[in-house]
């Protein structure tokens, strides 16, 4: 968030969780999604951004259980139940609507997205 902008202290901080992990580490992605759900359940304003590599786990047919993680699509379907409304993808080609809906962003939009949040956490 812009340092010169005044923020209402009564509002929760806006957090952006930026998933950069590759599909070879679904446990890290699973833990990040669990953290997002917990933060949102505690009243925090949480948005998610998936890098091109991290977004591969969201495609239909990705088997996280083969690498020791539970099916991440179940967590993703629960996002709206926890109040997480903003999910962004970098280069989402190949996605199906079954995988997850979200907003596509391009590389040149990432900094703007980061600037719109008070805290960015890379996972």
Image (spheres, rainbow, N blue to C red):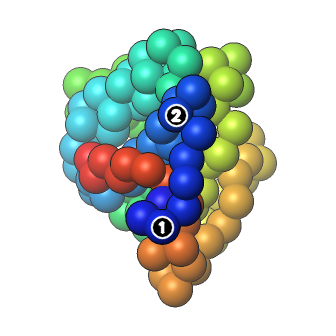
Disc assigned to residue 4: 1
Is 23 positioned to the left or the right of 46 in the image?
left
Is 121 positioned to the left or the right of 112 in the image?
left
Who is closer to the viewer here, 99 or 49? 49
- Vertical side of 97 occupied by 46: above or below: above
- The number of numbered badges drawn on the structure is 2
* Residue 17 in view here: yes
The secondary element bearing badge 1 is classed as loop
Q: Quadrant of residue 106?
A: bottom right
Residue denoted by label 2: 9
* Residue 61 in view here: no
Q: Position of residue 48 (x, y in %)?
A: 51, 46
- Answer few, some or many: residues within 10 Å of disc 2's Cα (few below 14, many 20 plus, some between 14 and 19): few
Q: Position of residue 88 (x, y in %)?
A: 59, 56
Residue displayed at 49% across by 54% down = 117
| Residue at mark 1 to residue at mark 2: CA–CA distance | 14 Å
């Amino acid at each position: 968030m812009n340092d010169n902008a005044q923020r209402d202290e009564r509002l929760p901080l806006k957090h952006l969780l930026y998933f950069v992990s590759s599909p070879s580490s679904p446990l890290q992605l699973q833990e990040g999604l669990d953290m997002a759900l917990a933060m949102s359940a505690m009243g925090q304003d949480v948005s998610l951004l998936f890098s091109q590599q991290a977004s591969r786990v969201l495609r239909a047919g990705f088997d996280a259980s083969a690498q020791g993680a539970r099916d991440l699509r179940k967590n993703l379907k629960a996002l709206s139940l926890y109040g997480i409304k903003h999910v962004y993808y970098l280069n989402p080609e190949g996605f199906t609507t079954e995988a997850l809906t979200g907003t596509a962003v391009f590389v040149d939009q990432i900094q703007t997205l980061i600037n719109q949040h008070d805290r960015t956490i890379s996972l």
